[in-house]
Amino acid sequence: MDPTPQICHSAATSSTPNKHRLVVAFVLIALVGVALRIYPSAGFNGIGYDEALYRGYVNDLIASGLGNYPEMAEHYVAVQSVVVKANLPPTRFSYIFSAYLWHLGTGAEALGALHAVSCLFSILLFFLAGIVAWRLGGSGLALGVFALMSCAPTQIHMSQHALIDGFFAFWATLSFWLLWENLRRPNDLRWLVAYTASLTLLVVTKENAMFVYTGLLALFLANRWLHFGQTTRVLLGVTVVGPLAGIAILVALCGGVDTFYYTYRLLVSQASVLPYAIATGDGPWYRYLLELLLVSPLVFLLAWGAVFRLKPGNKPALFLIVFVSATYLIMCNVRYGMNLRYTNMWDMPLRYLAVLCLCDLSQSFRRYHAAAIILAVILLGAFDLRQYHIFFVKYGLYEPVPAGMLRAVQILK
């Protein structure tokens, strides 16, 4: 029996009126979350460095079609071989291709199509977070996570710009959730196919797929002792086949193994000497902890509280903790490669743990514990919206790097 407090499992499921209130609450939160992502609120209205590069790739696709992709990859290798800067590689295919499809369907220009895709997947991740929380912890807990995700500062920020990180976070979240479902329902063909497809799309989205894959492997290892579910040979097989299929797609798009290899080799070598990366992408192993504390301090502290108050039988929370810890371990050791944008895939786990902590703390209010949780979630959401306004509207941050964030909260003048 999962020890999560009952209000977080099935509040609003005991009677028909409560079910109706639950539906209304989800609908209202959904409307707020979607509106916050669609409404253009960003203080930075220029074209960022990454956005200009993605726009160039989409324009190339519009002009020459998908058949020209090998030439795009070869051109990237030729240019990167002679310049001392790390341009974004064309192997981030699914994001670029999604914008191309958006252009074909709507006629939008390249940058507008990229913005639309980023906004759409920020919305999809918002809904996915609610679904995952429901599957892991029940309707009451899912409602709290859904509400906090609606106001998550970096999630809203990703919806406002043509950046890949929110798009990537969707596939990362989908992948670790589908692993959970496959562990709980071994050899179910539907879950296996969905899991394999998500891993393939993860690989063809961004090279950061290696971070997520490390987290998934850590979950398989931890399953031996924590018993999240049953590991089968078929599940292990598709965990290998999915990423290999993604690599095969990228090799085909690049026109061969050599171009594919040199694309990644040049990206890694040039990134390590890029002045901007050296200035903003390094720091101690606990840098991400400080950045998360800056951008969403109350949620972050509550999530830590849940870790220290965790009951051994709460397998969903342990599953999320193992995933975040394993990906953190590798991400904090990438020299000149740290950025708060990469932590978007932790937003749902952190908010799940934060709500779990609220459920635990609220028990001291006894019969008022449901009202206490609701009030706390509302206040947390309002505070996160204030944080979004400070960092990304008032101060107009485009890149959430430490110096800019510290100035936004007036720690640095």
Image: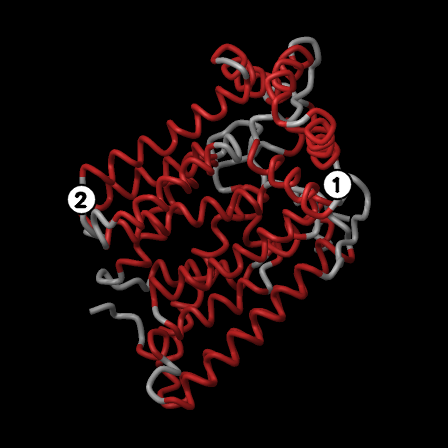
Residue furthest right in the image: 46
Residue nearest the viewer, comparing 361 with 269: 269
Of the two numbered discs 2 and 1 in the rendering, the one whose residue sits closer to the viewer: 1
Q: Label 2: which residue?
A: 224
Task: Decide: is 21 above or below 220.
Answer: below
Label 2, label 1: how many angstroms apart (C-alpha)? 46 Å
Q: Label 1: which residue?
A: 111
Q: Is residue 231 left or right of residue 377?
A: left
Q: Quadrant of the N terminus?
A: bottom left
Q: Is residue 231 left or right of residue 89?
A: left
Residue nearest the viewer, comparing 43 with 103: 103
Residue 376: assigned label: none
Q: Is residue 42 left or right of residue 236?
A: right
Quarter of the rendering containing residue 86: top right
Task: Decide: is 178 above or below 83.
Answer: below
Question: Mark 2–mark 1 contact, CB under 8 Å?
Answer: no
In x, y percent, where is residue 264? 53, 19
